[in-house]
Image (tube, rainbow, N blue to C red):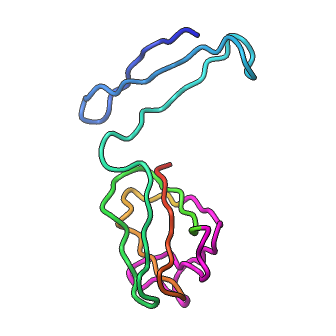
Amino acid sequence: MADKASYTFDSGGDRIPQKQVEITSGMYAPGVAAYSPPFPTGGSFAGQVTVATAGSPVQGPNLAWNAFWLKGHPSNTSTIWVGGSTAGSATGFPLAAGETILVPVTNLNQLWFDSSGSSQAVCWLRA
């Protein structure tokens, strides 16, 4: 496998390394280039937000990124409601255990989470 380094530049002129890998064997055809985007350098790559008390929305952590995958924790017994600061059954988007959605927000703290039961969690992953 041959690695090729290249760079792009962000709006501030900072260099962002990009990595292009040429795949010569495996399930891809020989010579097909695969692109790997840069991984997050600050904060966590994944985590969970727990709603301790039903009816009391919890704000997501202050974590900037382009979008986030959200998934109802597999052990949840109640619906998670995703939305603004008043997220709940009347205003939020329902997310059951195991359900996944992609939300294009620039910071996870733009989202609030509530639940119809206590001690329910939503899992998040930077997209």
Left or right: residue 62 versus residue 48 is left
| Residue nearest the observer in this picture, 116 or 62 | 116
| Residue depicted at 41% across the width and 70% down the height | 111
- In the displayed structure, would residue 16 be above or below residue 83? above
Left or right of 39? Residue 22 is right
Query: Does 78 appear in magenta?
Result: yes
Q: From what the image shows, is residue 127 above or below residue 21?
A: below
Q: Which residues are magenta?
A: 74-102
Q: Nearer the viewer, residue 53 or 18?
A: 53
Going by the picture, which residue comes out furthest to the front? 75
In reply to whether residue 67 is colored magenta, the answer given is no
Q: Residue at the spot x=46%, y=83% of the render? A: 87
Q: Position of residue 103 (x, y in %)?
A: 52, 61
Q: Would you place residue 99 above or below residue 86 in this image?
A: above
Residue closest to the eye, 103 or 41: 41
Q: Is residue 94 above or below residue 28?
A: below
Residue 108, image x, y percentages:
39, 62
Is 12 situated left or right of 122 in this image?
left
- Residue at (33%, 64%) from the top-left corner? 61
The quadrant holding residue 106 is bottom left
Residue at figure coordinates x 38%, y 78% from the top left: 58
